[in-house]
Image (cartoon, rainbow, N blue to C red):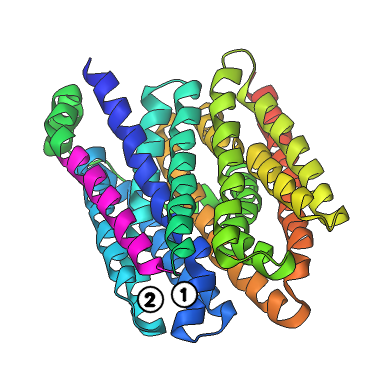
């Protein structure tokens, strides 16, 4: 019973992780207009969020080993609550940048802690449903924001509504702490009696399979982050949609991501995580071709939906494979670093695309997605080859 309660709380917590991620991108057309800043400044805010997330991701193994999963998740969610409320009162770019700090730090630790916990204690289907919960969060935010943008560009009210939702998630986490402690009593007792040494980054860096896996996450998260931050702006500036309608339509991308992860949760009961990844990559490639080849608005929306649908299952299934590919002694450290490199992609991809937009225009959006797709696809194939070689060597 306790494990079921914990799993439900984890799913709810992961909804909270997704809430802030898509909110800035969907609200940005209204934010930069009201504050009188350049459209490309969204990359600066996104960069600060990503820096905080990268820092907390690489430090997460030490933090989780010391404080355990549930307290880390609660404190991380509290930071995002503070960030959302702060964004709603922002008067200028400096204020936006300051609010981005707690959002980034909070996101990194909870991401690594929950992914590692589910990978070790639950099945692959649960990992997919976990990331499906994230999809619910990132789909919920732009939809709710679109309702406020439609009613007089009230993006601040949209942020305060999401703050209230995030606060409710934090309260659920806090109330569940005793359940976590009872269910993981041995883990807490061990933590009190001995300190588990963290795996040095230099050790992971020497492992070629670990290095290749980092690039799989860089490619996939480059696609995801650019769609998160620039998808709505692409629809507004390239497809002539209103900011309110653009924020509403980009929800189809997040619905695609959520649906892809939901269906892959059932698919992994019949096929391997690797097969699910390859099917998703084929779908993503076709979707990017559709975006590149068509100028039609409907085709663009369908293309974004399919990009989310195909790319969505990659993250949970590759994370689940981590505990299969690597020894348990280093799996948590590997997950921490792969999250770190994933957020490096989240940091640099929207930023670099901001420079592309300034120089060449928003129309290069599909080609930018193609670059991320090729990095993901080629490194996935290389990783599979290295894993097979290593298994053959040890047989």
Comparing 393 with 199, the one in front is: 199
Disc number for residue 242: none
- 343 sits to left or right of 174: right
- The residue most toward the bottom is 36
Task: Name which residue lies at 54% across and 37% down.
Answer: 258
- The residue most toward the right is 293
Q: Is residue 188 visible?
A: yes
Task: Name which residue lies at 23% across and 54% down.
Answer: 78
Q: Is residue 393 visible?
A: no
Q: CA distance from mark 2 to mark 1?
A: 10 Å
> What is the x, y in percent for residue 361?
75, 76
- Count neighbours of disc 1 (C-alpha within 10 A) and say few if under 14, some if 14 to 19, many if 20 or more: many
- 169 sits to left or right of 208: left
> What is the x, y in percent for residue 91?
34, 82
Discs 2/1, front: 1
- 141 sits to left or right of 303: left
Q: Are marks 2 and 1 in contact (CB under 8 Å)?
A: yes
Comparing 51 with 330, the one in front is: 51
Disc number for residue 96: 2
Q: Which residues are magenta?
A: 153-174
As drawn, 33 above or below 14: below
Dot 2 or dot 1: first in sequence order is: 1
Comparing 297 with 255, the one in front is: 297
As drawn, 259 above or below 103: above
Disc number for residue 31: 1
- The residue most toward the front is 151
Q: How many numbered circles are shown? A: 2
* Label 1 element class: helix
Quarter holding residue 89 = bottom left
């Amino acid at each position: 019973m306790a494990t079921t309660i914990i799993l439900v709380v984890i799913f709810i917590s992961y909804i909270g992780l997704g809430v802030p991620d898509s909110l800035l991108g969907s609200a940005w057309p209204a934010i930069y207009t009201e504050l009188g800043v350049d459209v490309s400044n969204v990359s600066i805010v996104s960069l600060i969020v990503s820096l905080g997330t990268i820092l907390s991701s690489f430090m997460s193994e030490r933090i989780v080993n010391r404080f355990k999963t549930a307290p880390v998740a609660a404190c991380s969610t509290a930071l995002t609550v503070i960030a959302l409320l702060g964004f709603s009162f922002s008067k200028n770019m400096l204020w936006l940048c300051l609010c981005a700090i707690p959002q980034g730090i909070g996101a990194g630790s909870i991401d690594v802690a929950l992914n590692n916990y589910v990978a070790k204690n639950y099945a692959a289907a649960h990992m997919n449903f976990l990331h499906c919960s994230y999809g619910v969060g990132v789909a919920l935010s732009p939809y709710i924001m679109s309702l406020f943008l439609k009613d007089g560009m009230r993006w601040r009210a949209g942020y305060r509504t999401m703050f209230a939702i995030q606060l409710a998630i934090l309260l659920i986490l806090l109330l569940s702490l005793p359940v976590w402690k009872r269910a993981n009593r041995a883990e807490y007792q061990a933590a009190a009696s001995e300190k588990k040494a963290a795996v040095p980054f230099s050790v992971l860096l020497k492992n070629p399979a670990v290095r290749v896996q980092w690039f799989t996450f860089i490619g996939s998260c480059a696609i995801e982050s650019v769609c998160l931050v620039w998808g709505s702006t692409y629809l507004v500036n390239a497809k002539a949609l209103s900011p309110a309608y653009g924020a509403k339509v980009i929800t189809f991308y997040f619905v695609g991501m959520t649906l892809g992860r939901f269906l892959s949760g059932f698919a992994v009961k019949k096929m391997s995580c690797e097969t699910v990844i390859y099917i998703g990559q084929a779908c993503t490639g076709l979707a990017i071709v559709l975006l590149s080849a068509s100028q039609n608005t409907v085709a663009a929306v369908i293309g974004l939906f399919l990009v989310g649908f195909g790319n969505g299952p990659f993250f949970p299934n590759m994370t689940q494979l981590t505990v299969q590919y690597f020894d348990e002694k280093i799996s948590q450290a590997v997950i921490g670093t792969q999250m770190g490199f994933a957020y490096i992609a989240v940091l640099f991809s929207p930023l670099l695309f901001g420079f592309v937009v300034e120089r060449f225009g928003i129309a290069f959006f599909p080609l930018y997605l193609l670059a991320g797709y090729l990095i993901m696809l080629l490194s996935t194939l290389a990783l599979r080859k290295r894993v097979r070689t290593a298994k053959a060597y040890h047989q």
